[in-house]
Image (cartoon, rainbow, N blue to C red):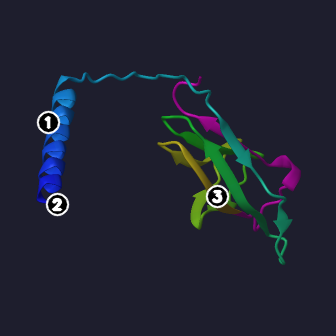
Amino acid sequence: MRKSMLLLGTMCLAATAVGTTVQASSERGGFRLAAVVNTVCRLELPGASAGTSGQIIDFGSFYQLCNARNGYRVVMRHPANMEGATLFWDGRAVPISQGNETVIADENHAASKYSDVRLDIRGVDVPISSLSFRIDPKGSVY
């Protein structure tokens, strides 16, 4: 029994020594992979519904997906002179510009997220069909 234990110990020591030798003489290798991924920016809008007073338009949750490295902007096109109207983007009030476009979100990184959107048009006569939204990548587009 003692002889077999001694033999087993010697074999383990020899295996460790061989493993160390092999490891010391092995070379490290690798490769580098680079790729260009197309820029994808998408804005999905659910159907809008007028609130009980008819003065709040609830757009629901917008889904924003944009993989642009420098981020993106979400823009609303609307009739000029919608002063008095306010857009709420995730609870944050965004005053509507006097022109035809208002930047409602300006992200400095790629993202995939949902945002709750509603428009308070009290005192402003605006047909819902005159409103549109788009997402624009910032920086280089591939």
* Quarter of the view holding residue 91: bottom right
Depth check: give the residue in front, 2 or 139: 2
Residue 78: give x, y in percent of width and height.
Answer: 76, 46
Where 140 sits versus 88, above or below?
above
Q: Residue, x 47% and y 22% (percent of image)?
A: 34
Depth check: give the residue in front, 27 or 68: 27
Residue under label 1, please give it.
17
The quarter of the picture where the C terminus appears is: top right
Q: What amino acid is found at the position of numbered circle 3 in the picture?
A: Tyr
Q: What amino acid is found at the position of numbered circle 2 in the picture?
A: Met
Q: Which mark is residue 114?
A: 3
Q: Which mark is residue 1?
A: 2
Q: How crowded is the residue under tag 2: few (<14 C-alpha within 10 Å), some, or many (20+)? A: few
Helix or strand or loop: what does disc 2 sit on?
Answer: loop
Report the span colored magenta. Answer: 118-142
Cβ–Cβ under 8 Å for marks 3 and 2:
no
Task: State how far apart marks 3 and 1 are (Cα).
Answer: 58 Å
Q: Is residue 36 magenta?
A: no
Residue 88: give x, y in percent of width and height.
Answer: 64, 63
The quarter of the picture where the N terminus appears is: bottom left
Which of the two marks, 3 or 1, is nearer to us in this view?
Answer: 1
Residue 99 seen = no
Q: Residue, x 18% and y 32% (percent of image)?
A: 18
Helix or strand or loop: what does disc 3 sit on?
Answer: strand
